[in-house]
Image (cartoon, rainbow, N blue to C red):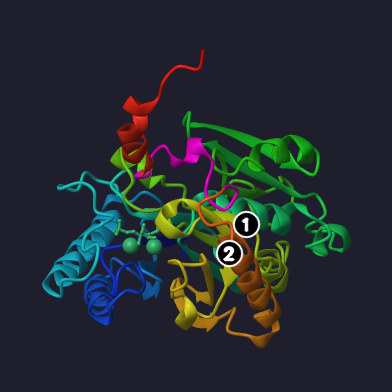
Amino acid sequence: MGKTTVSLIKADVGSVPGHAVVHEKILETERKALEEAKRSGLLIDYYVTNCGDDSELIMTHREGVDSPKIHKLAWDAFIAAANAAKELHLYGAGQDLLKDAFSGNVKGMGPGVAEMEFTERRAEPVLFFMMDKTEPGAFNLPTYKCFADPFNTAGLVIDSSCHAGFRFEIWDIIEHKKVFMECPAELYDMLALVGAKSRYVIKRVYPKPGGKLPENEPVACISTDKLYQIAGEYVGKDDPVGVFRAQSGLPAVGEVLEAFSFPHLVSGWMRGSHNGPLMPVAQKNAKCTRFDGPPRLVCLGFQLADGKLVGPTDMFDDPVYDFQRKEAAKIADYMRRHGPFEPHRLPPEDMEYTTLPKVLKGLEPRFKKIE
Ligand code: F6R
Ligand code: MG
Ligand code: MG
């Protein structure tokens, strides 16, 4: 059996009403495209869902990462879905499809991608995290906690197969550079970078050499596509996704989820211009209604069986997270009371690609020099 590739490719191709939820017709159109690809043998398996206004295509195959065939499949599915969205006059129909012609890879074309190729273990738990109304950096804190914080992941302390720690691939998404860092040895250096989450984002996590898992096969991968940099002007937030493997030498499913349960402040929310709490919810509750938010997080868990997707289990559909949801709602309320003031509204450098500069431009002639 060859290696398995797991691809999660997402895009906002229209929703109802406004930027709230993907219409069933869109999901149906995407399922049809992926079902045909499964029948033709290109896909081993697939699962289509949504997180708020984003369509999420979960796919397994043997084509490896960055496969033009798989990316074209996703692109064509989104195009068909965008056409269905246009017929229904859905809001933002085709919003994330920024180019007219497909050029071999969806990267830089609008959709977000998280994919990994790896040797499937006999029992391979995989968690798919999907966020709406936020940015890729929203993954930094939970990914750090999951793979580097012993107060979150007990296995780092008490399981010899996790004890060596992990290797992180960090991207500078402004200067398009990357760096690898080993934890725990370089923990403080890594935090110096990834604490600045709007610039430095964790892209992948790898096992250390000499452990149970091959050192060159990632164990987590996060989408890092910055929509505003692609489009040149604001066309919506990136709404990132991440794929995390778990158990036997990796953080347990419960340790991964524990890292994501804290409703930390992320940027996005209304007009991609506000800080607010990331609320972990059941898939059916990924519905950004209050001030187009607060930002939501969904997690679907599967077991892989030779590439087949066994599941899903809707991981945050559990009353144990009611407290975190309540806390998130409380923080959302507190942040909202700041109205247009920072730190609820983002600082000027993060507003550069929103609609704000046009407003400020109109005020320019009114300014006089202070003598
Ligand atoms: C946030 C988001 C929404 C919109 C807002 C205004 O990522 O998509 O909050 O920014 O609803 O949308 P438009 O400009 O389409 O009226
Ligand atoms: Mg939208
Ligand atoms: Mg969205």
* Secondary element at image label 2: loop
Observer able to see residue 218: no
Q: In front here: 343 or 255? A: 343
Residue sitting at x 36%, y 46%? 227
Most distant residue in the right direction: 158
**In the rendered structure, which disc, 2 or 1, sits on the residue that comes first in sequence?**
1
Judged from the image, the quadrant occupied by ligand 3 is bottom left
Tags 2 and 1 in contact by the CB under 8 Å rule?
yes
The overriding secondary structure of the stretch rendered in magenta is loop
Residue wearing tag 2: 278
Residue at position x 73%, y 68% in the image:
255
Nearest the viewer among 280 and 64 is 280
Apparent side of residue 152 relative to residue 144 in the rendered image (left or right): right
| In magenta segment, residue 334 | no
Amino acid type at image mark 1: Leu
Residue 37 at x, y percent in the picture: 25, 70
Residue 303 rendering spot, x and y as whole percentages: 55, 77
**Relative to 250, does residue 168 appear above or below in the rendering?**
above
Q: Is mark 2 within 8 Å of ligand 3?
A: no
Residue at 36% across, 68% down: 53
Q: Can you identify the residue that label 1 sits on?
A: 265
Q: What span is in magenta?
A: 342-355
**Callout 1: helix, strand or loop?**
strand
Q: Name, please, the residue furthest toward the left.
A: 87
